[in-house]
Amino acid sequence: MPQSTFFGGVHPFDGKDMSKEKPIKTIFPRGDMVYPLKQHIGAPAVPIVKPGDPVLTGQMIARADGDLSAAVHATVSGTVIRIGPHLLADGSEQECIVIHNDGRFHEIFYPQARSLEQLNAATIIESVRDAGVVGMGGAGLPAHIKLETENPRRIDYCIANCVECEPYLTSDYRRMVENPAKVINGLRIEMKIFSRARGILAVDERCSDVSRLFRDLTRDDPRIYVRRLRSKYPQGAERQLIYALTGRTLNAAMLPSDIGCSVSNVDTLVAINQAVMVHEPLLTRIVTVSGDAAAEPRNFRVRIGMSVRELLERAGGFSQPPALILDGGPMTGTRIDNLDVPVTKLTSAIVALRKDRCGAYRETPCTRCGRCVRACPNHLVPMQLYEDLLRKRDDLFLRHGGLECSGCGCCSYTCPSRMQLSYRIYSRRTALIRDPERAGIYARRLSTQ
Ligand code: SF4
Ligand code: SF4
């Protein structure tokens, strides 16, 4: 069986066995809920409730502000307590709606379910927009934006990104094993819009059970096929995924639609299915709680807005004091210093690690070994970019392609001198891309970031 892949990449310890085989467990929150108005790329949503208002589960509490924005919905019933700044997992403070959870989960009335045959492009886009669905693979692009491509007939490949390459994360795997029909139906809904496209379910080579399931369920659909990809990090990153599947190349200034591709991750496809078929807004997501300091690593269906502290307590707490708690996985996640922050639409995992997995290493000078160059999936020379940063030479950083960095972490992972390459290069890239004059053609991509 042929498998495709990309240049570079690394093979970190993946820790997936800790949580992979345990079924998803649903958690109903008991505490108050916090809803950031910006859980997506684009303008923050605008509150349509005020303190004292009663709310129901599924009720819209903030509307999208323009096209590049996403609505926010209450995921519990209760009363709005306040609207104001609240701490988030990345350490920033942001405007949030805080709701007292009455613990009853009274729901709004949902209209009758629809069938795939009843759908047209306008209905699909409107449903996805109203449901506040965003790209849940980390990007946070409102999902209706991808579906509103100027010429949908120019999309050749509609790709379901089922490659969960970040270590420890198994939420997509459990989704695929437990709800494969919803994933496939989400892809079929997208393909109603991209009517010329072929559908690809891209699966990691190690998930042969998932490949089999998908093949069985798509046997009668000649437009959809399953592709197995080599197990390597970051195989699930947009540029590496598209290249491995189609041979088409994308730079950081381009959008997948420029080269005839549309990519959605597993949870996003399920959210699209729920929004379009049963009118359900984005209320829950699957979160992996794992790491060697987590007492009972497992996947949980969590209501967006629940506190990370409550999630960890209800997940069994810690087996020993963690040295590091991450929002996301160890390659691209961010450190959480305060657990009183909400789970958002973009929270894929909470990973708690012991000291011996994340000890502080002393950085030593570069040995010119070239490992970072061989590992960089975007064909950069990280040691050169690092030097440009040390010399404060933004002109050289730009000339050496620094804006192509995706922050994947491969260079830092592979560096024997323990240099913080990825963090520093990607931080500078993020700062530069926000300056339209310096960003040049990359500014276009910023409009969707
Ligand atoms: S973090 Fe940036 S420079 Fe480092 S390997 Fe990834 S893309 Fe290359
Ligand atoms: S991997 Fe580290 S030591 Fe080797 S060339 Fe790159 S920066 Fe230098």
Image (cartoon, rainbow, N blue to C red):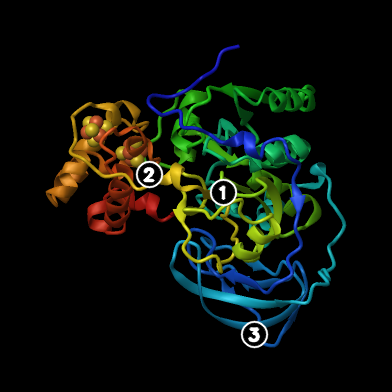
Q: Secondary structure at mark 1?
A: loop
The N terminus appears in which quarter of the rendering? top right
Kind of residue at badge 3: Lys
N-terminal of the two: label 3 or label 1?
3
Q: Which residue occupies the extreme bottom position in the image?
A: 52
Give the vertical position of 219 relative to 191 (above or below).
above
**Depth check: 271 or 347 in front?**
347
Q: Would you say the beta carbon of the disc 2 residue lies within 8 angstroms of ligand 1?
A: yes
What amino acid is at disc 2?
Answer: Gly
User: Which of the 4 quarters of the picture holds residue 191?
Assistant: top right
> Quarter-wise, where is residue 229 in the image?
top right
Q: Where is residue 181 drawn, in percent x and y? A: 78, 37
Q: Nearer the viewer, mark 3 or mark 1?
A: 1
Q: Secondary structure at mark 2?
A: loop
Q: Position of residue 402 (x, y in %)?
A: 26, 43
Instruction: Check disc 2: other Cα within 10 Å, few if <14, some if 14-19, many if 20+.
Output: some
Residue identifier under label 3: 50
Instruction: Please give the label number shown on residue 47.
Output: none
Give the Cα distance between marks 3 and 1: 40 Å
Single out the mark in the foreground, 2 or 1. Answer: 1
Image quarter hosting the C terminus: bottom left
Q: Which residue is mark 2?
A: 407
The percent coordinates of residue 356 (x first, y second) are 44, 43
Label 1: which residue?
A: 293
Q: The residue tagged with tag 3: helix, strand or loop?
A: loop
* Residue 123, x across and y down, in percent: 72, 53
